[in-house]
Amino acid sequence: MSDVAIRIDNVSKQYRIGKAKLRHDTLRDQLTYGVKSLFSRNGRHSPAANTIWALKDVSFEVKEGEVIGIIGRNGAGKSTLLKILSRISVPTEGRAEIYGRVGSLLEVGTGFHPELTGRENIYLNGAILGMRKKELDRKFDEIVTFAEIKKFIDTPVKFYSSGMYVRLAFAVAAHLEPEILLVDEVLAVGDAAFQKKCLGKIGQVAGEGRTVLVVSHNMAIIQKHCGRAVLLEQGRVVALGEALQVVVDYLADGALETNSAMIEVSNHPNRLSDMKPIVSRISLHAATGEVKRDFIQDEPVALRIQYDATMYSFTLTGVGFGIETRDGVRVGGFNSLMAMEPPHRIPSKGTAEFLIKRPHLTPGTYCVTVSLASHQGVLEDKIERVLTFDVHPADIYGTGYLLTAEDGVSAFDCEFCTG
């Protein structure tokens, strides 16, 4: 008996872009079309829509019980691949064979009916997976407890916050005993404590011998929880192998594109999908204001984020940044909520500036991620690893001992004595 859980064989997916052919069902539609035709070439439709290949000749196998990560830039085809595996979409060419019951968490609340309550949606999703009512009854309390929404379980999910959606959606997907679990980037919406609980559950599912596919921009998650990783680039598989090595190669390639101290980001490829292009420019500076990306150890680092959200109706409540090592280990971060007392508000347009007075970083290359949020912590714009900067060694202890990457990430401010 084969131990393959998923077999993807030369899968390609083509989409049509541009203007679709419109129906003209009403008199107004017909009149509008007639007027447009007068000014169009030969009175015909605009040129035929173009096509793009979201996936092209993708092939690999996933073994039973394997946890595998799917990584790549926005538009690389990661979510398209998961939609094909979930049977939401069909490939244009090739075959995707699934051996087992699939639980999918592709978008916030995917598969939920907005008019139904949380309770009703749990049973609906279970029925879709082919589970009997007795099985659902047995799992129900565990799902509700994990999702932390007991108080709202009989409320229609259309009234849920994005966080409640995520908690219930993940709880349903992970607890209804699928043999294969597909998880897209939705965990980024939850709070830190819930993300940790979800990752623990993924580990538990994998430990039970079930198969897990994870799409994530968080390289630390991929490195820690996945045995192998697939790197997609423009719809093609460009790397497949041990997760640690694939991630290191991917981040190294990305860092080469972000070696400027000032960058325009209105159309940056590292902006997460579904984010709004609010941030327009990001730059690194010395404390004196000079634009730079090379810093001596413990030299202050200033970060400026230029943004404009005046075209949107929501109120911005926070702006922040995070710093990672080149291989994806998070060092730390800061945001405006830490610096201000409630109510949290920032102008809808302006420049946010952060000054890290003493970074306490060891020598190496570090990557900066920036984000803005509105009410209830909803991310409105986030651009990952948009800038890199280098920290160079200095005699910070005054003893001639120069730190290196071998000494870790943080340079401790420590005293020593003997008794």
Image (tube, rainbow, N blue to C red):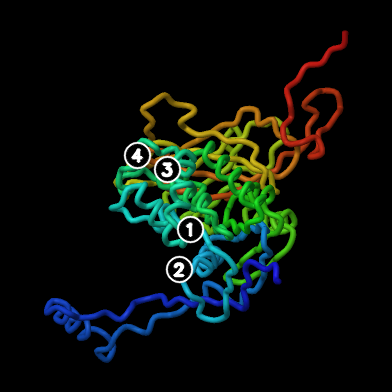
Q: In this view, does 240 lie above or below 271?
A: below
Q: Residue 8 carries which label?
A: none
Which residue shows up at 44% across the image and 26% down it? 340
Q: Can residue 260 be seen in this view?
A: no
Q: Residue furthest top?
A: 419
Foreground mark, 4 or 1, reads: 4
Regarding mark 4 in the picture, which secondary structure is present there? helix
Label 3, label 1: how far apart the Cα atoms are: 15 Å
Which residue shows up at 84% across the image and 12% down it? 417
Pointer 4 residue:
152
Q: Is residue 66 visible?
A: yes
Quadrant where the N terminus sits is: bottom right
Label 2, label 1: how far apart the Cα atoms are: 10 Å
Quadrant of the rendered image containing residue 17: bottom left
Depth order, front residue of 276/208: 208
Estimate how packed mark 1 is, as few (under 14), some (14 to 19) or many (20 or more) residues with alpha carbons within 10 Å. Answer: many
Estimate how packed mark 4 is, as few (under 14), some (14 to 19) or many (20 or more) residues with alpha carbons within 10 Å. Answer: some
Pointer 2 residue:
88
Pointer 1 residue:
106
